[in-house]
Amino acid sequence: ADDSIYFAIHPTLGFIYNTRPLYLHQLLSTSENTITEFIVNLTVLARDRGHHLSSQTIESSKTKVNIRIQPVNRHAPLISIKQHSTLSLATTPESFGSSIYAIIHVSDEDMGIYGQICSFNIIDGNQHSLFRVTNQSSNDYNIQLIKSIADLFQLSKSLSMFELVVQARDCGQRITNKTIQISLDEHFSMNLQFTSEKYYKELFENSLIGTEILQVDLKISYSTGMMNKYQTSKKLSDIRSLTDNSIHFSIINGNENGTFGITGNGIIYTRSRLDRENVAEYRLVVRAQHHLN
């Protein structure tokens, strides 16, 4: 490259000045960090601008100017993975939304502002928006899973690994990209189980239509290919937040006349009038199903 494009000279005063930032790695066209300096060799021409007869020779003079450029931003950021784990459902459901799957340390050997990290981001591979970067300390970052179990289940059908491309940029505008591979546990199973095998409730026969009788409750269990099983007995609202609101309740037996209904929150209610003389007891069978099962 023509190094002279980085410099200009005042036409009458002879002051040499730079016309653009002097990034050493751009001048060298390399990322080599062992170069300690760079010398630009310029040739300066001075000519007499006075009026001369055509037969006279115009006075001129040349000189060599050597400009020694000292580096201040020799090093690009260095990205190192301090901890890395497989993305698996072998984590308790309560931890989703805060699970840390990689701890990244970013360093830079330059001094001053050029050694400071200005940004660290995921620039590719996060098209499903499963992950986010959070700043743990000045140069330490966490990569966290922020989606629900259901999202993870859906992706496990077609993906076995995520390749996230992260980018660190120092305040001298040098960047480093690195690919982080996060494996996805292929073998998932999830089961919903009622907190009680039987529910019992007494009801007056003069109850109004729409009377709420009781609410069935669930616990969720799931396992990985290693047959490690984890359970939680959360409230239904908490389970819904973990499973993308995709649990469906239905009464599959004992409700031939449609006397009862069940809401999306598992609340059983009356849909018609009750008559104890005709039916003194109902034995309902309720099913809860997640769309991933």
Image (tube, helix red, strand yellow):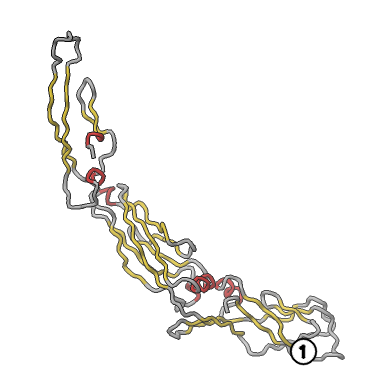
The N terminus lies in quadrant: top left
Please state which of residues 133 and 155 is positioned toward the viewer in this rendering.
155
Seen in the picture, residue 283 relative to 133 is either above or below; the reply is below
**How many marks do you count on the picture?**
1
Q: Is residue 283 left or right of residue 237?
A: right
Q: Is residue 189 left or right of residue 278?
A: left
Residue at 68% x, 74% y is 264
Q: Residue furthest right?
A: 277
Residue at 45% x, 79% y is 90
Amino acid on which disc 1 is placed: Tyr
Image-quadrant location for residue 284: bottom right
- Give the residue pinned by disc 1: 282
Seen in the picture, residue 150 relative to 252 is either above or below; the reply is above
Residue 165 in the image, given as x and y percentages of width and height: 38, 60
Q: Is residue 159 left or right of residue 82?
A: right
Q: Is residue 270 left or right of residue 54?
A: right
Residue 46 in the image, given as x and y percentages of width and height: 16, 22
The C terminus lies in quadrant: bottom right
